[in-house]
Image (tube, rainbow, N blue to C red):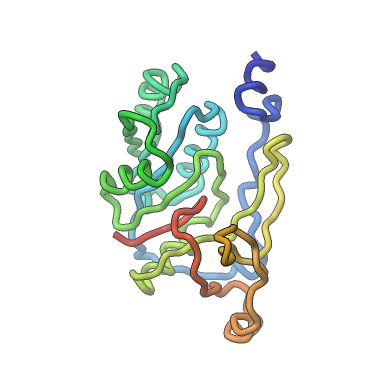
Amino acid sequence: MLVEARCDYNLGTGNWDGEACPSSFLSSRCKTKVYPDELPNTSVVIVFHNEAWSTLLRTVYSVINRSPHYLLSEVILVDDASERDFLKLTLDNYVKNLEVPVKIIRMEERSGLIRARLRGAAASKGQVITFLDAHCECTLGWLEPLLARIKEDRKTVVCPIIDVISDDTFEYMAGSDMTYGGFNWKLNFRWYPVPQREMDRRKGDRTLPVRYVEHIFQSIACVFL
């Protein structure tokens, strides 16, 4: 079983069911932030294709367990034509017993990440759409800052600092708040240092957002409907 799983997913399968990532990796500066009580709710859209059972469920459970339920309108799982049997009826039956509404949408044929996300977005009922990859974990306090920024300006597309989970050992490593993602003139994705103008605008307060233009459909992003 482990050998087969390693061949299929190239993962440290012995760590799949071990400890999850830290429930909170917030800096002391972030912990003092206060967000409005009345925030828009969100539909969380997660696209998967032949995803490992454990990583998919860890993603879903982290959303449910580490988000205020009044802010979760629903979780939408979009199956981009998976072939694994356990991602069909077994998954359908499993999500029926979860604490928040979980909807599964199945693409008729392999359509790719963006088309699958658009399908999930079209079915969303929340005031905000949050896109997540199928192999990530949310920490405590992940959702409120994103929704607060959108409450301030509904035209904003927000993305958090994304930490790293090793695909081999599941070791958790903190990401940097001093870089941002973008494309060069060859359309290659790269990480760039935060410009000095943004450092000056934030006046040393690194809890304030960095303004930049990036591709919308990345690992984690929130969009107002």
- Nearest to the observer: residue 134 or residue 143: 134
Residue sitting at 46 percent across and 56 percent down? 221
Residue sitting at 34 percent across and 57 percent down? 128
Figure check: 205 above or below 64: below
Figure check: 184 above or below 42: below
Find the residue positioned furthest to the front: 186
Residue 156 % position (x, y): 40, 69
- Nearest to the observer: residue 56 or residue 3: 3
Residue 101 % position (x, y): 33, 38
User: Number of marks in the image?
Assistant: 0
Residue sitting at 69 percent across and 16 percent down? 3
- Nearest to the observer: residue 101 or residue 172: 172
Residue 145 % position (x, y): 48, 64
Figure check: 108 above or below 196: above
Q: Is residue 186 left or right of residue 106?
A: right
Q: Quadrant of residue 123?
A: top left
- Nearest to the observer: residue 24 or residue 42: 42
Residue sitting at 54 percent across and 70 percent down? 33
- Quadrant housing the N terminus: top right
Q: Is residue 110 left or right of residue 30?
A: left
Residue 57 % position (x, y): 50, 32
- Quadrant housing the C terminus: bottom left
Find the residue positioned furthest to the top: 1
Q: Is residue 145 left or right of residue 151?
A: right
Figure check: 113 above or below 215: above
